[in-house]
Amino acid sequence: MKFIIKKKIKNVGWKIHIIVNLFILCSLIIRNLNQDLSFETFPLKEIKNIELYLELCNISNIRELYFSDLKKFPKISVISPIYNRGEYLLRFLKSIQNQNFSDIEIILIDDFSSDYTTELIKQYKSKEKRIILIRNKKNLGTFKSRNIGVLKSKGKYIILPDPDDILSQDCLKIFYTFANKYNYEMLRFNIYIGRNNIFFSNFANQTPSRPVFQPELKTFLFYASNKLKQIDFNLANKFIKRDALIRTLNLLNKEYFNMYITIYEDGILNYLLYRTIKSFYFLKKIAYYYIRNKHSITRKRFTSDTIKFIFIHLTIVFDFSKNNFYEKNMFNALFKRLIIKNHIIKRFKLMKNNRNFFLNAINKFLENEFVSFKNKNYLQNLKSKLLKQSEL
């Protein structure tokens, strides 16, 4: 009789546990029912809700618990360079671990972090066997670290999230199924931007969901940059076929491949990707949650290195450009976005430590006829300020 009572109490306790979890989940869904922001089937608004959602994924049977059948060559490589992101890393890793697509490898490149990032990754790696840790012996910068991760990868497709952001739980399954079925070399998806625990901006592309193939590619990108004012700098919102990404990296000479760049490096690879790929698809799905924090690039003050990285970005684009209508407009649009919009001319005093580098780049741009008249005037004024500064 006692055994039967204990068994019934145990069953009741388990049922209560399930009901409580379902109640929490339903409450979150009802609370955010009228919001545009969604994980497709799971609307969320605040970061604390996202973290609760990730915990629920661990408790329930939503995701696969065992990965004993993981193949030597996974379908997807998740690659992320990391430098001092221990504060946010656990949340990021959970969002990958909780994916309902298990055939992945997680390549984390620790760029010689000085906080507890390395220890946290090692601790997490002991439980998550799909993690591959690469630790740089010195700080190499985001650009080179990411390139190293790509070369080490074995997946058919690659995704390149930042280590302080979040992926929606279903995105890898959707991306792989969609890209593999239609043989697209790249998917571009949408992101939501969050700050101070609240997601406030849908950074959705204004174009409809649609495929774009090579013959139309340049026309389409020109339309996006000139009519919609959308210059695509982001790598985190791309799902890319590894072969296409390797072809892109092969365009870079050794100097560029190994260059130390930590800011605006996304745009370099993006620009070259669009030159390399044969097809891509604009996917309206919001699958990426970009969370601004105290370490975000958007919150960092301008330094001499920031301006140097901008000029390196433009120099690489310039070196690969040809003197035609499309290249001319793309370069001038990038120049406007990076140089004019950031008011570099007002920050010229920051350029004194690398004056020769900047003057060489400026002279290179001034000598080419496809740089617009307006941009040349801006460059000439900037050059005059630098030369005047050197005379003082």
Image: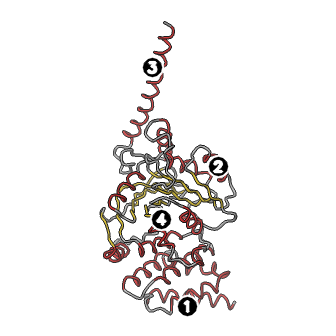
Q: Nearer the viewer, mark 2 or mark 3?
A: 2
Label 1 belongs to which residue?
363
SS type, badge 2 = helix
Residue sitting nearer the eye, 320 or 91 = 320
Report helix, strand or loop for mark 3: helix
> Which residue bears the numbered disc 4?
235
Disc 1 and disc 2: Cα gap in Å? Answer: 48 Å
Amino acid type of the residue tagged 3 in the rendering: Val
- How far apart marks 1 and 4 lie (CA) works out to 30 Å
Look at discs 2 and 4 and give the one toward the viewer.
2
> For mark 4, does the 10 Å Cα neighbourhood hold few (<14), some (14 to 19), or many (20 or more) residues?
many
Give the colour scheme of this rendering: secondary structure
Say which of marks 1 and 2 sits in front: 2
Asked if the residues shown at circle 4 and circle 3 are in contact, with their CB atoms under 8 angstroms apart, the answer is no
Q: Give coordinates of residue 143: x percent, y percent.
A: 57, 69
**Quarter location, residue 359:** bottom right
Q: CA distance from mark 2 to mark 4?
A: 26 Å
- Residue picked out by circle 2: 122
**Height in image: 94 above or below 237?**
above
The residue sitting at 44% across, 36% down in the picture is 61
- The kind of residue on which mark 1 rests is Asn
Q: Is 244 left or right of 143, judged from the image as shown?
A: left
